[in-house]
Image: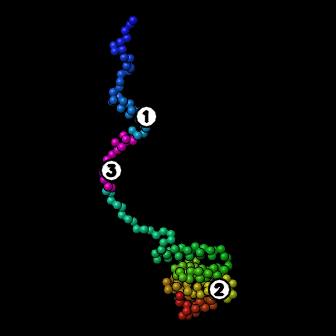
Amino acid sequence: MSRIDGGNRSSSPKSSLPERSSTERADSAANKGAQLNPGKKDAQATRAVSPFQGRSDFEPDRRPTPRATPAVALGGGPLTPASSEASAIAGADAELELLSEFSDADAQGGMASAMLHAHADEPASQARIVERLKQDGRLESLFGEVFREGNPYVEQPHRAAVVRALDTAMARGTVTSDDLRSFTRGAYAQEWRQIGSELSAPDAKP
């Protein structure tokens, strides 16, 4: 009968694979992480070689504060006197282009007087209309048509607007007394004599 000796029996052999060191395990984990997130390593490398910007990330920005520029008034803001007058002149020029749509002098005169009446509170616009009509050689005929008896395109407020506009133009030197005397000897002599008398009246002043 054989004797069983558990104490002298050798234990089961261990695995033949050698146990990896802790350094090898760390390298393996790092390689595995790089494979899962390859961009992270590149970003870290880029950050490491980025040039020095003159200050650390923990210092406040020392760049000088840009000097404040004056605010520019856009649409809706108050206009300066010069820009307001320029805008009024541009508007008057645009309106005068409408006169070419009428072939008759009486209709053109009625339109011109209506423009002056619409700009009764805008001396710059009125002066511009008178100036342009004089330059075009139409001042004598169109304003003569405004005061011609029986013109169906003209109302009394329009005639009053013509007188005020002429008074403003004379104050600015756009129209002179010599111009008025010349008109009183032309084709609309009667009408311009009436205009001259209304200009001399005390209530002709704006």
Lower sequence index among marks 3 and 1: 1
Packing grade of label 2 (10 A; few <14, some 14-19, many >=20) is some
Q: Can you name the residue that lies furthest to the front here? A: 1
For this rendering, which residue is in front, 134 or 125? 125
Q: Which residues are magenta?
A: 42-61
Residue picked out by circle 2: 155
Q: Is residue 45 above or below residue 90?
A: above
Q: Which mark is residue 35?
A: 1
Identify which amino acid the numbered label 2 is placed on: Glu
Lower sequence index among marks 3 and 2: 3
- Secondary structure under badge 3? loop
For this rendering, which residue is in front, 205 or 41? 41
Q: Position of residue 167 (x, y in %)?
A: 53, 87
Distance of label 1 from label 2 (alpha carbons): 92 Å
Q: Which colour scheme appears in the figure?
A: rainbow
Q: Which quadrant holds the N terminus? A: top left
